[in-house]
Image (spheres, helix red, strand yellow):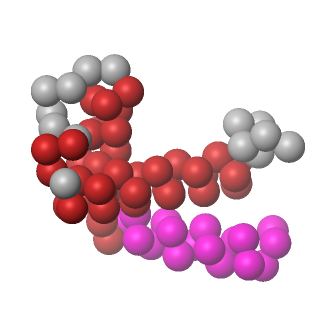
Amino acid sequence: MSAIFNFSSMLSVLLLLICTCAYVRSMVPQLLDNHRTGWQGVFYKMARIGERLSPFVAGACLLQAFVVLIGI
């Protein structure tokens, strides 16, 4: 089943993408700057979500990990 049609998989992909973008921005800030448009602008916005809402993103990652391990 595709990650688009499975909500749990889609949430996992979204959380991993947010965390990855935030990590890349912390290591190489000029790669994801705020003047980009298109997909690069979306990646910048995901990095900002990861930076500003990091406690909530971390909590969501832990909750998703628990759900994946239990198999709900």
- Which residue is drawn at the image coordinates 64% and 46% (left, top)? 10
Residue segment shown in magenta: 56-72
Residue 28 position within the rendered picture, expressed as x and y whole percent measured from the top left: 19, 54
Whether residue 43 appears in magenta in the rendering, the answer is no
**In-image side of 20 versus 48 (left or right):** right
Residue 7 in view in this figure: yes
How many labels, in total?
0
Q: Quadrant of residue 53?
A: bottom left
Whether residue 63 appears in magenta in the rendering, the answer is yes
Image quarter where the N terminus lies is: top right
| 38 up-or-down from 22: above or below | above
- Which residue is drawn at the image coordinates 46% and 51% (left, top)? 17
Residue 27 position within the rendered picture, expressed as x and y whole percent measured from the top left: 21, 61
Residue 51 position within the rendered picture, expressed as x and y whole percent measured from the top left: 24, 59
- Which residue is drawn at the image coordinates 51% and 69% (left, top)? 61
- Which residue is drawn at the image coordinates 72% and 43% (left, top)? 3
Q: Quadrant of residue 64?
A: bottom right
| 72 up-or-down from 35: above or below | below
Residue nearer the viewer, 40 or 42:
40
Q: Is the stretch drawn in magenta largely helix, strand or loop? A: helix
Residue placed furthest toward the right: 1
Residue nearer the viewer, 35 or 72:
35
Residue 49 in view in this figure: no
Image quarter where the C terminus lies is: bottom right
